[in-house]
Image: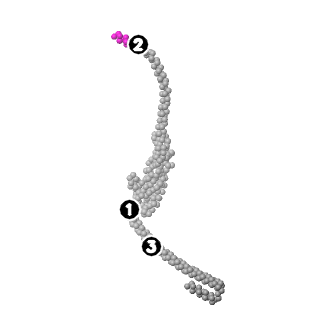
Amino acid sequence: GSLMEDLEGYRQAQAAEWHQTHQPMELENLMDSLQRLAPGRRGQQKRLAALGGSCCCFFFLLLSVGTLTPLQYGLTVNLITKQVNSDAVYEGGRHLIGPWKSFLAFPSTRVTVSFDNMKDSQGPLQTRTKDGLALTLQLAFQYRIEKDQLGKLFALANQQYEPLFVRNARDVLLKAAADYEAIQYWQQREKIGTEMRDLLNKRLAQVYATCGGLQIMVIDLPPEFEKSIVQTQVTEQMQQTRQHEQDAKRITADTEVLKAVFTRNVTVTRNGADAHFTQVVGVANAMAQQQLLEVEAQAMAKVQERLKLNPEQMVAYQQFVAYHSL
């Protein structure tokens, strides 16, 4: 037992001696290592700080960008205070509008509103004509929001602008439809559509929009009236057909008269030309005969002169020439 205690005491003495000689060196080495690592850590901290700042700036920039499609106008709204800036109107694209803001979008193109039987439409317009007949109209119109007036429109109706347009359009169109008689919807349909469009455009201008077009698609009147109108149209069409037939016969008769006059003029002209031709030919033949006789006379005179013939001999010579030509 004493031997083991002596060995344990010896190990403890050796350990104490080792610690006394090596501990100062380890502390010095540790301090040297920390001094060498300190500049690297400071640089790394600076880089991390710069990276964090860049990420914050990029995230802040993303929060500050708003987007509109090419067919939209926009007003900015603060997402925290819910206040809308109605003074600045933006067009389609990406815009730097600041953080915690977004766009309220409005259409920048024409939008069609229909009053018909189709799904999601406003339903047909029902009223009475000026002469008291029931009338159902199915039509459509196109409105467009004025960019310069968008702030005023938002102050008037917020984003419920289309119901406002529909109410005004229904009021104007019902009053306008009642100003026409039933027969006018058959005879002056295009004119009625133009006048309704102009009236609607004036009304929409009061709520900061314009009407770019209006189309009357269906006009429903009582069946009895439509039947009478159809019969009237058929009768008028038959009268026009008969009138056209009479005009065609008259034109044919006039053509025959003109043809006869032309033929007569051609005949007279041809007869006159033939007579003139005969006259010219006769004169030419007479002149040719006269010239032939003159030439023969001159030839006989020269023969008589050269041969020194007396009149009797000359007659005999002429007879001889005549017999020879036979």
In x, y percent, where is residue 236?
Answer: 42, 68
Residue sitting at x 65%, y 88%: 310
The image shows residue 62, relative to residue 283, as above or below, that is above
Residue type (three-letter) at the residue carrying disc 2? Ala
Measured Cα–Cα span from mark 3 to mark 2: 150 Å
Asked if the magenta segment contains residue 11, the reply would be yes
Residue type highlighted by circle 3:
Lys
**Label 1 sits on residue:** 222
Q: Residue at x 48, y 27 (%)?
A: 41
Q: Nearer the viewer, residue 189 or 285?
A: 285
Res. 13 mark: 2
Residue 152 is left or right of residue 313, and the answer is left
Q: State the residue at coordinates (44%, 48%).
A: 160
Q: Residues within 10 Å of mark 2 (few under 14, many from 20)?
A: few
> On screen, 258 above or below 97?
below
CB atoms of marks 3 and 1 within 8 Å = no
Q: Position of residue 242 (x, y in %)?
A: 42, 71
Counting residues from the start of the chain, the first of labels 3 and 2 encountered is 2
Dot 1 lies on which element? loop
Tell me, yes or no, if residue 283 can be seen here: no
Q: Amino acid at mark 1?
A: Pro
Q: What span is colored magenta in the figure?
A: 1-17
Marking on residue 179: none
Circle 3 sits on which residue? 249
Q: Main secondary structure of the magenta part?
A: helix
Q: Which quarter of the image is occupied by the N terminus?
A: top left
Q: CA distance from mark 1 to mark 2?
A: 127 Å
